[in-house]
Image (cartoon, grey):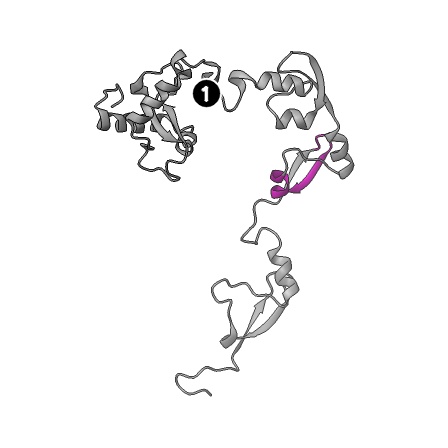
Amino acid sequence: MPRKGQIDKAARKNVECAACGIEFLVYLYRDKYKKTKQYFCSHDCYNEWQSGSNNPNWNGGLKVFKCENCGNLVERKKHEVKKYKNNYCSPECRIAGSKTLIKTNCKCCNKEIERPKRYAEKYQHLFCDRSCRSAWMCGENATSWNGGSKSLKYCSAWSDKEFKEELKERDGYQCLNPTCLLGDKKLVLHHIDYQKHNCNPNNLITVCDNCNIRANTKRAWHTAWYQAIMHRRYGHNYKEV
């Protein structure tokens, strides 16, 4: 008999395997399944029991889907069905389905064309050739479209070298951007409101070439930034300030 406070290592109890139902003895001091009350006679039984709905990662089992090519109903795991946009029952059906052609119209010339089904599902606009694609991408359909400012012409004073030289002299032949990174190596005049035809001296500021390139991004912010600089330096009033 064990003393008070000691563990009786000989104590055992009769349990039943949760997978196969076989009864076997387990030592109480080594019982690590007290909370779950699920006992297994071997690792094979444990793996078999946990392979189905008893698994904590169980998500409902197989899902029935329809093959995109032949239309047959096939069972497959849910994560495999979600992985692909189009599901096929076999590699042969996948190859045949990728070659399936559908009729559509060219986005540019409206000519009827045939394209693979996967292209129609992947791309929003289809074209008959590269020339039509390039023609459609010009203008408002271009991703870099900013209202057609490139098509505007400069004012007549822009070609006057003396006019530009006077403005650079007004600004002290230096880049007026306080956050300039490269210094005053190459000075240019920047249109504050990005309107090429507006050559009012209040709308022109001397900056370096690097700052002029940086101003092509976040135009609203740079407009307010340079207007504030001109307002503090020369007292020019703008609607935005």
| Residue that appears at 35% across and 18% down | 163
What kind of element bears circle 1?
loop
Residue type at mark 1 is: Asn
Crowdedness of circle 1 by 10 Å Cα count: few (<14), some, many (20+)? Answer: few
Residue 236 drawn in magenta: no
Q: Quadrant of residue 72?
A: top right
Q: Can residue 157 be seen? A: yes
In-front residue for pair 190/216: 190
Q: Measured along the vertical axis of the image, is residue 91 above or below residue 15?
A: above
Give the residues in magenta.
67-83
| Residue in the image at 50% along x and 62% along y | 36
Query: Where residue 118 sits in the image (x, y, percent)?
Result: 67, 28
Quarter of the image with the C terminus in it: top left
Q: In the displayed structure, would residue 175 be above or below residue 48?
A: above
Quarter residue 233 falls in: top left
Examine the structure image and report whether residue 68 is included in the region drawn in magenta: yes
* Corner quadrant of residue 109: top right
Name above or below for residue 21 compared with residue 120: below
Q: Is residue 61 left or right of residue 32?
A: right
Residue in the foreground of this view, choosing between 130 and 35: 130
Q: Nearer the viewer, residue 230 or 95?
A: 230
| Residue denoted by label 1 | 146
- The count of marks equals 1
> Residue 97, image x and y in percent?
74, 30
- Please, is residue 117 above or below residue 105 in the view? below
**Residue 217: horizontal and vertical position, in percent?**
42, 29
Position of residue 143 measured from the top left corner of the image (x, y, whole percent): 52, 24
Q: Residue at x 74, y 26 (%)?
A: 100
